[in-house]
Image (cartoon, rainbow, N blue to C red):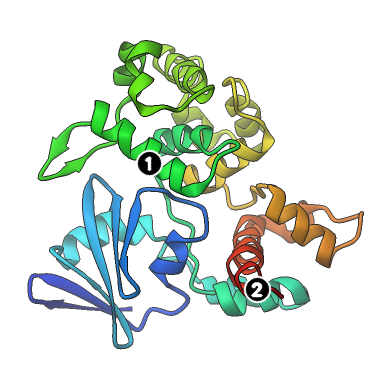
Amino acid sequence: MKFTNIDGGLLLTECKNFDPFVSCECGQCFRFEKISDSEYELFACGRRLSIRSAENGWYFSDIDEREFRASFLPYFDLDRDYGEIIDSFSGDAAISKAAVSGGGIRIFRQDPWETIVSFIISANNNIPRIKKIINSLCRLLGEESNGFYSFPTPEAILNAGLDGLAPIKAGFRTKYIIDAASRVVSGEVDLDRIAVCGYDAALAELKRIKGIGDKVANCVLLFGFGYYEAFPVDVWVKRVIGKYYDDSFDPRSLGKYAGIAQQYLFYYERSILGSDGE
């Protein structure tokens, strides 16, 4: 990995298995905008980050190496050897093939609270509407700085109440967002405890929140807490399992990086095969 400071920004080169555009589009995060085929804006780590594709790498505007290393190196999970992870799945033909297309995917280490609310909103929803609701929520209750709106705290959401959240038009999900805020503020659901208590206990803890079942809980554990063994199953992943595996398939057989395998399979089935009719 090589960093070069250029024109007030940072050029990242010599970084294998990293494509922030593909990573944004694989269903794990919602606070991003595609500006063009060569530029995205990502809202993370308390700021807006412009990302442009560059020859042999990626250019990040208005950021220096120190800030990038402190905030976005862990956010993009760039210290992990994804090439080694891909090699560990060499005996699985489906994952190996999917990783050819999705090998640039990295699991973003997102804010746990934001991830909980985002995936509650994602239930029975489509990505454009999910993004619209989340953006509305941030503009309604987040703090503004230079045109960037932070994700609102549990306290801000709880204080707003059901009526206060009406403008975001989240429908039946609103009461689940309020329930999540209430349990986090009271300490009944402890995010620090979830981060360290182990996968099974963390899954059970999250499912205490109304509106969170196995699928949403696994998304939150994978994308918000770094439980890489979490394997969210939605309609696309069910299709993958039925297509490439038999009835005895158990995600636990994929080991401690099952969630990364899931992202390769999900992206390949939805974005590659789903778009070309294969």
Residue 132, which numbered label?
1
Residue 116 placement (x, y as % from top left)? 48, 34
Q: Residue furthest right?
A: 247
Q: Which residue is mark 2?
A: 98
Q: What type is the residue that disc 2 sits on?
A: Ala
Tell me the element at label 2: helix
Residue 57 placement (x, y as % from top left)? 32, 81
Q: Is residue 219 above or below residue 244?
A: above
Q: Alpha carbon of mark 2 to alpha carbon of mark 1: how far?
A: 29 Å
Residue 276 placement (x, y as % from top left)? 63, 75
- Which quadrant of the figure has residue 60? bottom left
Residue 225 placement (x, y as % from top left)? 49, 43
The one of 164 and 158 positioned closer to us in this rendering: 164
Q: What type is the residue that disc 1 sits on?
A: Lys
> Dot 2: few (<14), some (14–19), or many (≥20) neighbours within 10 Å?
many
Residue at 54 percent across and 22 percent down: it is 172
Residue 207 lies left or right of residue 34; in this view the side is right
**Which comes sooner in the sequence, label 2 or label 1?**
2
Residue at 63 percent across and 61 percent down: it is 266
* Quadrant (top left, top right, bottom left, bottom right) of the C terminus: bottom right
Tell me the element at label 1: helix
Residue at 45 percent across and 41 percent down: it is 130
* Quadrant (top left, top right, bottom left, bottom right) of the N terminus: bottom left
